[in-house]
Structures are given as C-alpha cells and as structure tokens.
Image (cartoon, helix red, strand yellow):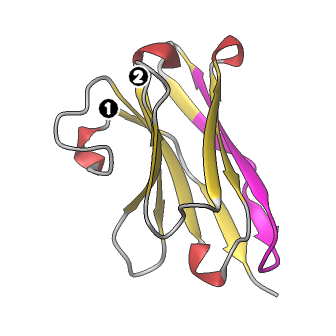
C-alpha cells in the first residue's frame, strides 16, 4: 500500500524551529520528486519546497528561502523539512507529496501523485 506519513508538527514560538519528516511506505522516494505544501485556513494550498530525485536539487518559495531547508535520507526512505526562524504566517497544515514527473513546475500541486495526511504547524507566543 502506497503511503506518505508526515510527522514533527506542533506548537512553536516565533523565531523557533521545527523539523518535519515525510516517510514513505509501499514505494521508493528515490524515484519521485518530493514537495512540501501548506494550507492555512481560508487560503489556497501553497508550494513551500521541493527536492528532485534526479540530482537532489532543491527549490523554495520566496517566503521561506533562507529559513527552510529540505534534505533526504534514502536509506530511511524519508525526506525532511527543517524550518528555522518561524513566523506566525508559517502557521498551516503542512503536507508532503510525491510526483513521478514534474512537467509544469514543482509548486503546482496537481503534478503530485501521492499525498500525506498533513501535520499541523502553529507558530504563536
């Protein structure tokens, strides 16, 4: 059974850090580009970051550049999103997703084949 499971969300103060994990079962992440998306209440789903399988290239939304970092552990079949200097506007449900091919751009959510259930990140004092 193909499954993506996110973990690591929670409540953090502004300026703090969290690391989200995206673990896969039933398929190998090596063959997929992995994206992180987020959705805040009343807002559209937004592409946050992506790591490509071919060469490990990473991509980031302007709003998180310099603060968020994606990485991978192929042995664990897991991808990570390290989030530093968190802001209140980073509050959202975060989803990881897997795309076999990206034809129209990493931040286009319709490109992705599999999705996790999401993990809540709340940045508040």
Residue drawn at point x = 51 percent, y = 50 percent: 95
- Which tag is nearer the camera, tag 1 or tag 2? 2
**Disc 1 residue crowd, few under 14, some 14–19, many 20+, Cα 10 Å:** few
Q: Position of residue 85 (x, y in %)?
A: 73, 70
- Bounds of the magenta span? 5-24
Assess whether mark 2 and mark 1 are in contact (beta carbons under 8 angstroms). Answer: yes
* 105 vs 119: above or below: above
For residue 15, side relative to residue 27 (left or right): right
101 horizontally vs 67: left or right: left
What secondary structure is the magenta-colored segment mainly?
Answer: strand
Locate residue 106, reporting x and y percent. 32, 44
Work out how far the residue at label 1 is from the one at label 2, CA to CA, in angstroms: 9 Å
Q: Quadrant of residue 9?
A: bottom right
User: What is the crowding at mark 2: few (fewer than 14 residues within 10 Å), some, or many (at least 20)?
Assistant: many
Q: Quadrant of residue 64?
A: bottom right
Identify the residue at horizontal 17%, vertical 34% (top origin).
103
Q: Total number of numbered labels?
A: 2
Q: Quick one: which residue is furthest to the left in this view? A: 104
Circle 1: element type: loop
Which numbered tag is attached to residue 103?
none
Of labels 1 and 2, earlier in sequence is 2
Residue 74 locus on image (x, y percent):
63, 16
The answer to if 60 sits in the magenta stretch is no
Q: Secondary structure at mark 2?
A: loop
Quadrant containing the C terminus is bottom right
Residue identified by numbered label 2: 32
Q: Relative to the observer, which residue lies in front, 118 or 12?
A: 12
In this view, the residue in front, 102 or 94, is 102
Residue furthest to the bottom in view is 125
Q: Which residue is mark 1?
A: 113
Residue 9 located within the stretch drawn in magenta: yes
Q: Is residue 77 above or below residue 34?
A: above
């Amino acid at each position: 059974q193909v499954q993506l499971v996110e973990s690591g969300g929670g409540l953090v103060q502004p300026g703090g850090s969290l690391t989200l994990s995206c673990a896969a079962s039933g398929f190998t992440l090596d063959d997929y580009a992995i994206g992180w998306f987020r959705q805040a209440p009343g807002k559209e789903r937004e592409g946050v970051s992506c790591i490509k399988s071919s060469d490990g290239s990473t991509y980031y939304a302007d709003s998180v550049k310099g603060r968020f970092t994606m990485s991978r552990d192929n042995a664990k079949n897991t991808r990570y999103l390290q989030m530093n200097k968190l802001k209140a506007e980073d509050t959202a449900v975060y989803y990881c997703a897997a795309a076999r091919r990206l034809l129209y751009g990493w931040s286009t959510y319709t490109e992705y084949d599999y999705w996790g259930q999401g993990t809540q990140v709340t940045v508040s004092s």
